[in-house]
Amino acid sequence: MPPYVPGDHPPGRGKGSSIFEMDTMGRDDLRYAGKKLTDPISAAEDKWRLVPAFLQTKGLIKQHVDSFNYFIETEMKQILLANAKVDSDVDPAFWLKFRDIRVKHPQAYDARKGIAYELTPHECRLRDVTYAGTILVDIEYVRGKQLVKKRGIEVGRMPIMLRSNRCCLTGKSPEDMVKAGECPLDPGGYFIIRGTEKVILIQEQLSKNRIIVETDRLGLINASVTSSTHEKKSKTNICYGKAGRVTMKHNSFTAEVPVVVVMKAMGIESDREIAELICGNDEKFLDLFSPSLEESSMLDPPVYTQRQALDWLGRKVKVTAMRSRIGMRKDYVEEARDLLATTVLAHVPVDDVNGQWNYRPKSVYVALMVRRTLQAVKDGGIVDDRDFVGNKRLELAGQLLSLLFEDLFKSWQANIKRAIDTQLKRSNRTSQYDAATAVAQTSRFITDGLFRSISSGNWNVKRFKMERAGVTQVLSRLSYVSALGMMTRISSQFEKTRKVSGPRALQTSQFGVICPSDTPEGEACGLIKNLALMTHITTDSDDSSMRRLAFILGVEDINVLTGLDLYEDGTYLVFLNGVILGVHRNPEKFVNDFRRLRRAGRVGPFVSVYRTTTQRTVNISSDGGRVCRPLIIVNKGKSMVTDQDVKDAIHGIKTFEDLIQEGKIEYLDVNEETDTDIAMYDKDLNYNGKLPFGVNDPAALERPNTTHLEIAPFTVLGAVAGLIPYPHHNQSPRNTYQCAMGKQAIGAIAYNQLTRIDTLLYLMVYPQQPMVRTRTIELIGYDKLPAGQNATVAVMSYSGYDIEDALVLNKASVDRGFGRCQVMRKFATMIKSYPNQTYDRLADRAEDAYGQVLDKYEILDDDGIAGVGERIHTGQVVINKQSPTETAPRVAPMADAAEHGQFMGSTDPTTISYKAAPMTFKYDGDAVIDQVLLTTNEEDQTLVKALIRQTRRPELGDKFSSRHGQKGVCGIIVQQEDMPFADTGVVPDIIMNPHGFPSRMTVGKMIELLAGKAGVLAGELQYGTAFGGSKVEDMSNILVNNGFSYSGKDYVTSGITGEPLQAYIFFGPVYYQKLKHMVLDKMHARSRGPRAVLTRQPTEGRSRDGGLRVGEMERDCLIGHGTAALLMERLLYASDAYDCEMCGECGLVGGWHGYCNYCKSRKGVVKVKIPYACKLLFQELMSMNVVPRVKVKDLE
């Protein structure tokens, strides 16, 4: 805990400062009550130790798992209850009910042993199987006159999230996980679909059921609310038009309708009552609203009563909406009444009171929307910011799967109903129809829908017309950090191509909940975000108990209040999840009482309550998708968490949940944070202008009292940015660059990395944990699965090979394994069976005429698969598969088939011919066969996988980076004897050009070098945690005590001349990462090669052995130099030169043997050489009736 420094908040030396004693020594001896003010404050030390206690129960990956568990345990059952019954249109006596639904743990069936066994995620990855559990339902239905009950009927399979309560890994010890082939540090929270790891990204959405007031494209003010319930989703707009008319806009209406007509249709017929509900006593509001009040009487026909209003609105309802209604077409009044009750503002309930629908809450809601619009018109500043985090909701895997499952379940139910009706219509049935068969036969529908959506990432929900792409992504296994970073990623549906700064900007409301550094560069900048370390995303909870509690705490019901009561001075409207409950006369007391009950555990810990003074509302929120974070409660200037609490948490006596139940820590969402005063450190706690030690600070008197205290300031960063040492000493873009590069660093990805067979795997041979670590590194386990090495770095200029950030590497270090990595590649193929009873096969090695095995088949074993440990080079076959040339079933006459003893569709095995379909190694450099796997997939087809290992040492052009966004390629590898060396005999591994520091301002890297050097000498790891860490002064003292310069500079001798260098060199260890960008994967050149069929130009791209494009800029450069022959060579002769005949008379291409087909003569036909693409362009133009004519000159 840093000591309290008087310089942070000057205590003031004016009147009333006589309690301070000051002697000649100055500020450092400032005393109060016999204590130095620089003495540490008696507060909870090491509060950051609460962070690991938090991460054991919440945060990072836990929110994905909690969301999925809630879906499996609660939401699936709610969906079943809402769609529990299937009736028949054919037989009124028939019905089918679903009683219960559950999901089993994933299991696989062993056909040989005839038993089911527990399926592990590792087996799914190897066998390309989906990690899914069976969905079982209990049903009850009528068979004839008999009531039948059946339990455990399979209706589909649900993909299971790893580490959820349906996963076999949950609750297992690290030893058991290792036995199951799983890494204990693996984050979980993802799915395995056909062997591929898929993550459902967190989706960012605008809040549902909340009023958002904003300016539209035309500059007009409008208030919109997106209503969302289980049955309906709709958007309602209140617009303030140019003529001062207030209208309502909704998809169900053909045009905008006057808001007064809507209010009258909801039963408020009196103009005075409408004016009171919207304007209260405020004359300014009345002036703005008066043109709209007169509008209903000016309509044709005029509208005065509720029935007239309903009839008028009924005529404006879209025809399609009417036609889609079930049953008979209703009259206009009924149509409008239905629409207002169920579709317009669908989230505000309309209750049936004594046979009459009560529109009162909905009419007040419309009135409030109008008032908010008028308020924004009157004062342009009172518009909502849609980028404010409090106005956003984050959708997790559970919520997205819930939407998808509900849609699939309803469609599946409709399919069952159709199948049952078809069977019941049949009059020639011999036995009673059993509906259970229809349920069992259609079980693939739900399975296929879930698997398709998760594997493709396309979320199509027909009921809500929701079509989203890119919801899921393949889990990046480039490094441990890249996998972890992906689990905290937030994806926005905002168009990446739009050049707007608002959604991309770093909002102040993101503090503590969204990482300020971890976002990609380029078009997705600011749209793809990452969660901070201690962010928690809430799940939905039942609000009926909070409704009762609000009324107990003095909320007056909205149904008994007039418009004047709503807007009385000191009266605040009370909302619960966007629905108006009523008003409260003493909002401050209400909020305080509610918070006290929450801290006492009587209300859920994630329920938020906050006041807004501009709108005079109190908002209670318990909906899912809100971002919140834990903070320590401060009472009368004192932190509620004591030193003893922290010790108890460290020793496991107390959990984080215990501290919440004791009312010492609470979760605040972003909206509630705006209603609080949060201190960073204990020294900043303020109570009635008194800081700790009773210091009276004049500046503190003007500040509100501190209500909360941060647990640890470094938690404002996310898991990826938390790896950077001393990030607060770097320029901010550098931290952003490191967040991108930290995910590309080659290292250890998991404990089970050598048993995995992934498409592409990069592994560091000798990974090391960093000398300078951070608290986050320990919390996420990066020290156990690191991605880099501690390199001794000399910051100096050496030869010309280090300009532009290039690095000079020591050859001896490279020989000993610095930067050495392994690249693993998977080659896989399926041995398929075909409809005509033929199969793929693994063939023997092919021999030449002399009986010698051909070179390309040299490494194959007798089974046609390469042998483990064999060396392989480009062009050699890994798996020698052959496929039958004919796979379609033959249709032979029945007599012929019987005569030859064959069944229909089969092929005679002796007549089958095969074609080669080998898996060939096509990469640069030699490699070794690491593993071979033969197994079967879900369809019981044989799967052959071979893993090929390539060991690479660093070479010129390979990319390296420190943890401060300082990337560079290897410029030269120098012999050790030519490298400079320190007087201790230490030779650097890397020489870095000092010009990389001034403009980049990465002071964090300099301090890391200093701290790393001190750590090596002291024999302990140092900390570079954000806003803290080991201090430079302490590090320098360690250096001095060990006989080194306090500045980290050393006396260095040249390895070439043997003379001492003329300057001291900054010299010490820095953690360097080797990135996946290696020159061997990028190197590409060609002379001649494949060409595209259509344009006859060279193909594009390294993988297709493509040509190197001379683009527009290169062309301009050649023109500028006047090199006409070179221009011709590059753009014509070396590309797509084409000899053709052209007619000088008509100017058209298409002569043949000196004869023009258009002019029908040989006169003026000349041979020319043009690009083939030019000839193609001419023909394309002619197809569109545009005739290009060329003037030709006979050069002979």
Image: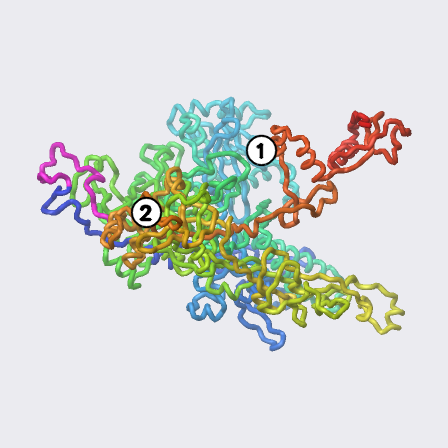
Q: Tell me if residue 871 is in the magenta stretch.
A: no
Asked whether 800 or 265 is in front, the reply is 800
| Numbered tag placed on residue 145 in the rendering | none
Residue 1019, compared with residue 678, is above or below; it is below
Q: Image point 40% across, 26% down: which residue?
A: 379
Q: How is the image coloured?
A: rainbow
* Secondary element type, mark 1: helix
| Numbered tag placed on residue 1007 in the rendering | 2
Of callouts 1 and 2, the N-terminal one: 1
Circles 1 and 2, Cβ within 8 Å, touching? The answer is: no
| Numbered tag placed on residue 313 in the rendering | 1
Left of 508 or right of it: where is 224? Answer: right
Q: Residues within 10 Å of mark 2 (few under 14, many from 20)?
A: many
Q: Amino acid at mark 2?
A: Ile
* Secondary element type, mark 2: helix
Specify the quadrant of the image occupied by residue 158. Answer: bottom right
- CA gap between label 1 and label 2 equals 71 Å
Q: What segment carries the magenta color?
A: 1-27
Specify the quadrant of the image occupied by residue 600. Answer: bottom left
Residue 562, compared with residue 65, is above or below; it is above
Residue 12 visible here: yes
Asked whether 373 or 556 is in front, the reply is 373
Marks 1 and 2: which is nearer the front? 2
Residue 581 visible here: no
Specify the quadrant of the image occupied by residue 839. Answer: bottom right
Q: Image point 68% across, 36% down: which residue?
A: 1131
Left of 545 or right of it: where is 885? Answer: right
Q: Amino acid at mark 1?
A: Leu
